[in-house]
Amino acid sequence: MALILNIDTATEIAGISLSKEGESLLILQNREQKEHASWLHEAIVRLMESTGYGMGDLQAVAVTAGPGSYTGLRVGMAAAKGFSYALGIPLIAENTLKVMAYAASLQGLPAGLLCPMIDARRMEVFTAVYGSDLVELLSPTAMVIDQNSFENYLSAQAVSFFGGGSYKCKPLFTNPSAVFVDVNYHVGYLGILSFLRYLQREFTDVITAGPVYTKEFYTHTKK
């Protein structure tokens, strides 16, 4: 039995799930991004109590490593690493954009490429491009978008754009091959991918694991 705690605090909506053999037993979410840190550990307690399992029953812990919110990524990764180390169970880290693309691939989108987007402020997004089989065509990157972005893909076939960062692109992309869709994304999809990684024993080293920021992190010092 693969019982996995899944943690996703990378975007505006945080989520945790307990999955058994890839199937979510229960999903809890928090929609207040500034409260992800204070919400997470209390939510995990409620998750375990509600499902009747204890932390000692876990076989692994999974987390979305990024890209995404800098603070959210640190919160999720720190919790996942702490549980992995303390319980002596494997750590599974998955790219946030891949989980989004996987969710889209299961929701009957128009044929073509998959382009998940996470808002990175101003006209910048975290994005990647995947085939319908989830083969990575453009590695996760931070991109400042303009009207010519993705033209090399759009000139060849349809591209489905989705995620919180895609809304700022819609007025710019006039190519008819650009399709904007709503994808129901939640941590349950991480639960499926983490189970597949568990079966393949594709684990992340708990000592060296860290958030995948995708672009340099800046802090501002008060004068």
Image: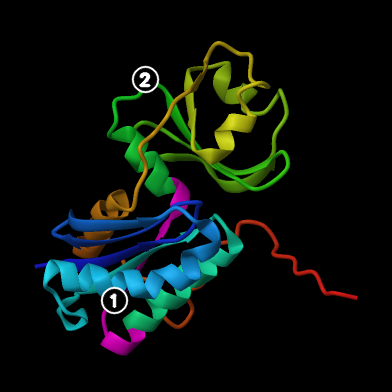
Q: Quadrant of residue 61?
A: bottom left
Residue 111 numbered tag: 2
Viewer-proximal residue among 79 and 28: 28
Q: Secondary structure at mark 1?
A: loop
| Residue at (34, 42) in percent of width and height | 102
Q: CA distance from mark 1 to mark 2?
A: 36 Å
| Residue at (21, 80) in percent of width and height | 55
Q: Secondary structure at mark 2?
A: loop
Residue 90 numbered tag: 1
The answer to whether residue 40 shows anywhere in this view is yes
The residue at the far bottom in this view is 86
- Magenta run includes residue 1: no
Q: Quadrant of residue 62?
A: bottom left
How many labels, in total? 2
| Residue at (29, 76) in percent of width and height | 90
Answer left or right for 200 relative to 8.
left
What is the crowding at mark 2: few (fewer than 14 residues within 10 Å), some, or many (at least 20)? few
Magenta segment: 85-97
Q: Do labels 1 and 2 touch, CB within 8 Å?
A: no
Picture quarter with the C terminus: bottom right
Q: Amino acid at mark 2?
A: Ala
| Residue at (26, 68) in percent of width and height | 5
The answer to whether residue 201 shows anywhere in this view is no
Picture quarter with the N terminus: bottom left
Q: Quadrant of residue 95?
A: bottom left
Image x and y of residue 67, in percent = 54, 55
Q: Amino acid at mark 1?
A: Pro
